Amino acid sequence: MSEESLVPETAVPSESAGAQMTFWALVVAFFFFVRKFAGLIKEHLLARFFGAGPATDAFKVIYNSIIFNVYARAEQLLRPAYLPEFVRQREQEEGRGWRLLGTMASLVVVAHLLLVSALLVFARPLIRLMWPDLAANPQAFELATLLLWMMAPALVFYSLSLLPELTLHAYKRFTLPAIAEACYNLLVVGVLFVGVEILWHPGHPRAILAAGLGVAVGGVSRLLIMLPGLRPKFHLLRFSLALRRVPGTLVVLGLMPPLVLGIATGALRPLVDSMVCTRLGEGMYAALDFGRKLSDAGIMILPLAVSLVVYPYVTEWAAAGDRQRMSDSLLWMTRALAFLFVPFSLGMVLLAEPLVRLVYDYQEFKEADVSKVTLALMCYASGLFVYAVEGSINKWYFALKDTWTPNWVGALWAGAHFVISVGGGLYTSLGLAAVALAYPLTKAGKVLMLYVMIRPRLEPIPGRQVYPFLGKLLLASGIMGACVWWLGWALEPRVEAWHPPLAPKLLRLLVLTGVPGGAGMVVFLALAWALHIEEVAQVWKWLRGKLKRVLRRGR
């Protein structure tokens, strides 16, 4: 492999940075979709092989609470702190960036070896302390212990894989990390299926260990898949724990304390909401969680892909002091996500009840549950645009080596979240609605505050690029919303009287969600085209160009 293998990936050399970011966001989103689909298959296999029994409890508790939780916290610390400093060190001298990589890799390995050793030695008392009800079941306790012993060593590789991913992102190489992420989930699914069907066989009391083996194999593979992408620079890599001697190491570590504050306050939000909901009555927290997960399904792929792709570009421009390109890219990101998620959010609010019935309303799900989950979904879905841009606006601060501002602002608004959730949930008639609204309201406050505070650090954005777009977007979304509401109102009595021979309930719900939703999308796009919203023309130009190139190759 030659040195050229680490040059940045580009969609087409002549395209602008905005077009390149759009292209790679779509590529990464595709692999994230594959990952999400593989995750759904994993959940299906767990339900199919083990149901909601003690074996599934043991796996989910250990994986969600320890394995994935440790990886997620490592990512929250490394992504904002490491990537900007690696870019700055590499721009001064290539070897300086790679020495920083070697030192951070050494720290990650040592820290995780200590953690893994503690998990292996204290597995049984840890499970008894944290999950006494699980430990009270001898079968679940034994399986949880075995699963922790099996999966914990893979944490070293799983968390270490973050550094190759971030380093490749710094070179604007997004495909290999996205493939590695998708392969992780695909391998978990494959090993789970083969392990249950061949190694342990269905019905075996320890067949759930196949899931643990899949996580271990997937964690190791996530690292190994990305290493070939870094191979041309391996000769520059130096592993060391001499923190003061390696430029940039203390800077990275100094950026982490504010991130710990953000992680802590972020973890408190769901804890406080769960405490309030359990006081509101039986099933309230389940309704809140069902509504939240249904709204999250709309924002877990493309916004995450956008935030990952824009980060290395913005970091590079921040290192070069190019405030104009940082300003332009912030405008591009905000307009693109607003164009997608303002109408999507409105449509989800208007179609909340049929969506809830389509996904959840089966067997033990009662009519009262439909009402509660619909209320929670409407509240959460109102903030989809805010959630989508939050992850990206943070990256502009991180690129400027400022981890403090987004985290103290987040902590401030987390306090407001607690006031709205507790005060509104327990001491007003709003109840569940107050708890659900606390999240979008405080996230909106945080995002607005971050946008206001970033403005003096960038070049001014002309109002002509914002206000006409905003007016056109709100007009198109409002007309679309009226069409969706009218179609839903007009269709409901007709569809309820319709009794198709196969799966009548499912077909009726698909019609009640699909017809108004599809018609609303067509109306919105047509209005956006008629109103000359630039994002429609840009997407059409990009698609037409790609189609022409494909046709030319086929001749």
Image (tube, rainbow, N blue to C red):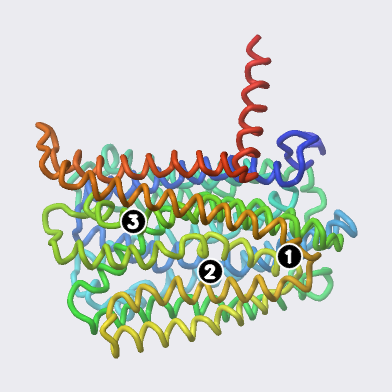
Above or below residue 408? Residue 223 is: above
In the rendered image, the residue lying farthest to the right is 92
Residue bearing mark 1: 399
Residue bearing mark 2: 73
**In 3D space, how far apart are the residues under numbered discs 1 and 3 (Cα atoms)?**
38 Å
259 and 504: which one is in front? 504
> Within 10 Å of the Cα at label 2, are there few (<14), some (14-19), or many (20+) other Cα atoms?
some
Q: Is residue 48 left or right of residue 235?
A: left
Residue 227 found in image quarter:
top right
Residue 157 found in image quarter:
bottom right
**Residue type, mark 2 in image:** Arg
Residue bearing mark 3: 350
**In 3D space, how far apart are the residues under numbered discs 2 and 3 (Cα atoms)?**
35 Å
For marks 1 and 2 on the same chain, the one whose residue lies earlier in the sequence:
2
The quadrant the N terminus occupies is top right
**Residue type, mark 3 in image:** Leu
Q: CB atoms at circles 1 and 2 under 8 Å apart?
A: no
Residue 259 found in image quarter:
bottom right
